[in-house]
Image: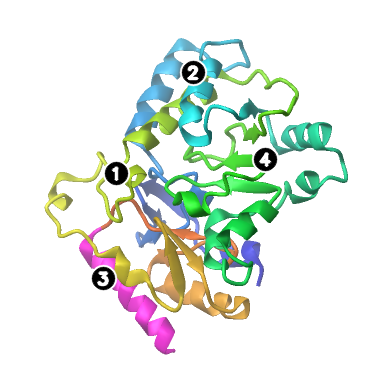
Amino acid sequence: MDAAERWALLPPIRRARGFYLYDYAGRRYLDFYQNGGRALLGHRPAVLSSRLKKLLSSGLLAELPSIHGPRLERALRSLVGPERVIRWYHDDVRARAAVIRVYGVDSPQARAFDRPADPAAVAATASEAGGCEAAREAAAVARLRPFVPPAAAGGEADLLLPVIPFPGAFAPPVLCFGPASRPPASDVVSPLLLAGLERVVLQLQRDPRWGGALCWLQPEMPQRKRRARAPVWETLETDLWRRIGPYLAWRGDYEDYDVVFEEFLKAGFILSPGPDEPSIIPGWCSHGDFARFAATCRSVECG
């Protein structure tokens, strides 16, 4: 099966709350995929919801000039550094055209744009790639994932694609070009989307994971769960995964992933649909769910 076929195994989802998804039969799933990292702060982060509601009441939906573009750029500097040239475009087609205009249609950047190097996957296969440093230097385009340690962040790639935790895929793609690049100007995008992106980027800086915490509690976590014993995420260092920050990079054979994905789905856990894209440890969950996930890992390993 490919990633689309694995994803088709999921039942229709009725609602999403935090890091849990609920189907129409009332069954709850703990989300380790998080929309590829777009739901890293949860599927309904409070900071984003309040911001969008305020902009909606102002009627700022159309593509209009606003103050939120410069604000988003300032916020992104904390992720990509002061030297990068930051741009955003309406969609991937416009973004790819900008990459081709800067680097050329036959450039490594243009060829790698559709399948950029993933820092978590690079770190997991560093020994085969001749070390993490060599793997990073060979990447023309790299995804920049929050909370990945600097040694695996891919920060030296010519073009960075930050994964910003805005839950929907309709937010404009953000590209971070090299300092000497002269890409086309950013598209005029709805202030609603720019303000939402800015808010979640700022929230990342306040997240305990930014400081390297292995377990954490989100502000919207139910009060009764805050007294629960924190899961020991180090126990997920198994033959199935290599953990890089909150990311779990698949370290097994690709042909085994179909069975693994289905077994975890039966147990109530949604993994990344593709073995080349990491699963992500949820920002919070019950201790019982953590224990079941660890037990499922052991069961799959023994099987």
**Which amino acid type corresponds to the residue marked 1 in the rendered image?**
Pro
Which is more toward the observer, 237 or 300? 237
What residue is pinned by disc 1? 208
- Which sits earlier in the primary sequence, circle 4 or circle 3? 4
In front: mark 1 or mark 4?
A: 4
Q: Which image quadrant: the C terminus?
A: bottom left
Circles 4 and 2: CB atoms closer than 8 Å: no
What residue is pinned by disc 4? 159
- Which sits earlier in the primary sequence, circle 4 or circle 2? 2
Q: Which residues are magenta?
A: 286-303
Q: Residue at x 26, y 40 (%)?
A: 220
Residue 138, compared with residue 163, is above or below; it is: below
Q: Looking at the image, what colour scheme do you see?
A: rainbow
- Which sits earlier in the primary sequence, circle 1 or circle 4? 4
What residue is pinned by disc 3? 291
Circles 1 and 3: CB atoms closer than 8 Å: no
In the rendered view, does 207 fall on the left or right side of 61? left
Whole-number angstrom distance, CA of label 4 to CA of label 2: 21 Å
Whole-number angstrom distance, CA of label 1 to CA of label 3: 22 Å
Q: Residue at x 42, y 32 (%)?
A: 200
Q: Which mark is residue 196?
A: none
- Which sits earlier in the primary sequence, circle 2 or circle 1? 2
Circles 4 and 3: CB atoms closer than 8 Å: no
Q: Which mark is residue 71?
A: 2
